């Protein structure tokens, strides 16, 4: 499962940089730093989707390592190839679906003026400033963990190991045979 996660993560990182790099290179080579609103919204969709997917994959990777280290006897039953594949597919689908909500709302805005943003990277705040529409909802619909329908699972995975460490009973400092006890409790 870890190689599936690492393979997806490396593919994700390649896509992640590809969402910004072409526009940045065009900006550097031509000197034209302006980006149209439609291109900006498209770039924001792909960048936000890949960022959300990255957070989910990182959470899954940490959960995979948690199971492998702290529950080695249950690891094969809890994290098999099929389940790991389903989690990865869920991360990708959830990442792209969650940002689609924000992009749909942005596409409903009316823009006035030159309809160009003086950046090679598109962010939410320049689009909101350029809009002639009422943007009172902008603070409520910032991309965040609540927008990702799959995010409750990865964030739970993130907090579970922390809770386990804080809430676990104290570990004895001295064991009759120090080698096995120290090995068992050194990783968890």
Image: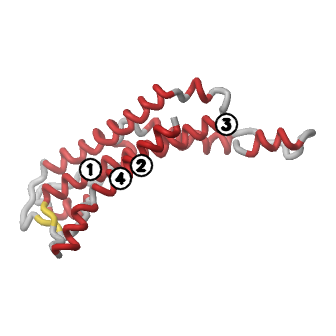
What secondary structure is found at the residue carrying circle 3?
helix
- Per the model, the C-alpha gap separating discs 2 and 3 is 26 Å
Position of 110 with respect to 69 (left or right) is left
Q: Which mark is residue 70?
A: 3
Sooner in the amino-acid sequence: mark 3 or mark 4: 4
Q: CA distance from mark 2 to mark 4?
A: 6 Å
Residue indicated by mark 4 = 14
Proximity of marks 1 and 2: CB atoms separated by less than 8 Å:
no
Q: Nearer the viewer, mark 1 or mark 2?
A: 2
**Marked residue nearer the N-terminal end (4 or 1):** 4
Label 4 secondary element: helix
Measured as percent of width and height from the top left, residue 2 is found at 52, 39
Q: CA distance from mark 3 to mark 4?
A: 31 Å
> Which residue, given by chain and number where applicable, does mark 1 sit on?
46
- Asked whether disc 2 touches disc 4, contact meaning CB atoms under 8 Å apart, the reply is yes
Q: Which residue is mark 2?
A: 10
Residue 150 pos. (x, y %): 39, 36
Classed neighbour count for the residue bearing mark 4: other residues with Cα under 10 Å, few (<14), some (14–19), many (≥20): few
């Amino acid at each position: 499962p870890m190689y599936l996660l690492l393979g997806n993560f490396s593919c994700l990182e390649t896509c992640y940089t590809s969402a910004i790099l072409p526009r940045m290179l065009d900006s550097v080579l031509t000197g034209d730093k302006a980006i149209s609103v439609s291109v900006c919204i498209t770039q924001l969709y792909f960048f936000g989707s890949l960022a959300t997917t990255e957070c989910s994959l990182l959470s899954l990777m940490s959960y995979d390592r948690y199971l492998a280290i702290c529950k080695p006897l249950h690891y094969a039953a809890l994290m098999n190839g099929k389940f790991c594949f389903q989690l990865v597919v869920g991360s990708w689908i959830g990442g792209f679906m969650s940002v689609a909500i924000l992009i749909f709302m942005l596409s409903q805005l009316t823009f006035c003026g030159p309809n160009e943003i003086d950046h090679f990277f598109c962010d939410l705040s320049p689009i909101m400033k350029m809009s002639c529409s009422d943007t009172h909802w902008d603070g409520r619909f910032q991309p965040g963990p609540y927008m990702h329908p799959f995010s409750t699972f990865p964030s739970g995975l993130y907090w579970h190991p922390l809770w386990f460490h804080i809430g676990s009973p104290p570990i004895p400092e001295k064991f009759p045979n120090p080698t096995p006890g120290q090995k068992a409790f050194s990783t968890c």
